[in-house]
Image (tube, rainbow, N blue to C red):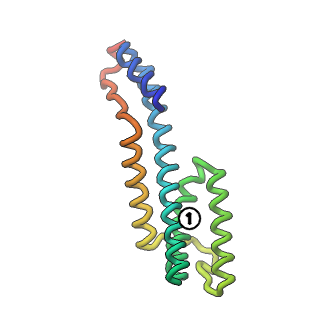
């Protein structure tokens, strides 16, 4: 990202708005992928914390529903962008299904889509905000390309 950002700035300095736009668009795409990855990582970390809480306090059905909702949402986000990770999340979902079945508390026993409940929706929103904050801290702003870009060349 840094290299593309620097190339974008240099292209703007050289008044080559077409090239600057190309590099800026690439930066945007890279940042979207990084934000999705960060948000997913944070969501999964929070799901792990939730599982640890479930283990300690025994709120299995409610807690597993939250975790399954998070996993389902994260998996859907990653399916088109990072299919290998999405496939790995399928394995985790299967493990959760087996775990809940073994202890006699089935979550989503018909195999239907589990909508995120209030807890999981809150966790996903927090993760997205945290990822956005990390992105702002880590990456510089992409320079504004003039609207009359075609006149600069």
Residue at the image point whose x is 63% and y is 80% from the top: 100
**Number of marks:** 1
The one of 46 and 84 positioned closer to us in this rendering: 46
Residue 9: percent from the left, percent from the top?
Answer: 38, 22
Residue under label 1, please give it.
72
Residue 91: percent from the left, percent from the top?
Answer: 68, 64
Q: Tell me if 97 is positioned left or right of 32 in this view.
A: right
Q: Tell me if 22 is positioned left or right of 153 in this view.
A: right
Residue 125: percent from the left, percent from the top?
Answer: 40, 60
Residue at the image point whose x is 62% and y is 83% from the top: 106
- Is residue 131 placed above or below 149 in the rendered structure? below
Farthest bottom residue in view: 104
Q: Say few, some or many: other residues with alpha carbon within 10 Å of mark 1 (under 14 / 14 to 19 / 20 or more).
A: many
Residue 15: percent from the left, percent from the top?
Answer: 36, 14
Residue at the image point whose x is 44% and y is 62% from the top: 124
Farthest front residue in view: 56
Residue at the image point whose x is 45% and y is 20% from the top: 19
The one of 90 and 17 positioned closer to us in this rendering: 90
Which quarter of the figure has residue 14? top left
> Is the C terminus in the top left, top right, bottom left or bottom right quadrant?
top left
Which quarter of the figure has residue 21? top left
Which quarter of the figure has residue 96? bottom right
- Is residue 138 placed above or below 124 in the rendered structure? above
């Amino acid at each position: 990202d840094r290299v593309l950002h620097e190339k974008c700035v240099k292209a703007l300095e050289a008044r080559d708005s077409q090239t600057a736009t190309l590099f800026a668009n690439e930066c945007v795409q890279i940042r979207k992928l990084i934000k999705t990855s960060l948000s997913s990582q944070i969501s999964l970390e929070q799901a792990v914390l939730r599982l640890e809480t479930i283990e300690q306090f025994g709120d299995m059905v409610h807690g597993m529903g939250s975790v399954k909702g998070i996993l389902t949402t994260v998996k859907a986000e990653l399916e088109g962008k990072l299919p290998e990770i999405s496939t790995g999340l399928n394995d985790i979902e299967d493990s959760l299904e087996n775990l809940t079945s073994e202890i006699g508390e089935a979550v989503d026993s018909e195999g239907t889509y589990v909508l995120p409940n209030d807890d999981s929706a809150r966790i996903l929103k927090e993760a997205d905000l945290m990822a956005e904050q990390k992105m702002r801290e880590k990456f510089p702003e992409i320079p504004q390309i003039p609207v009359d870009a075609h006149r600069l060349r």
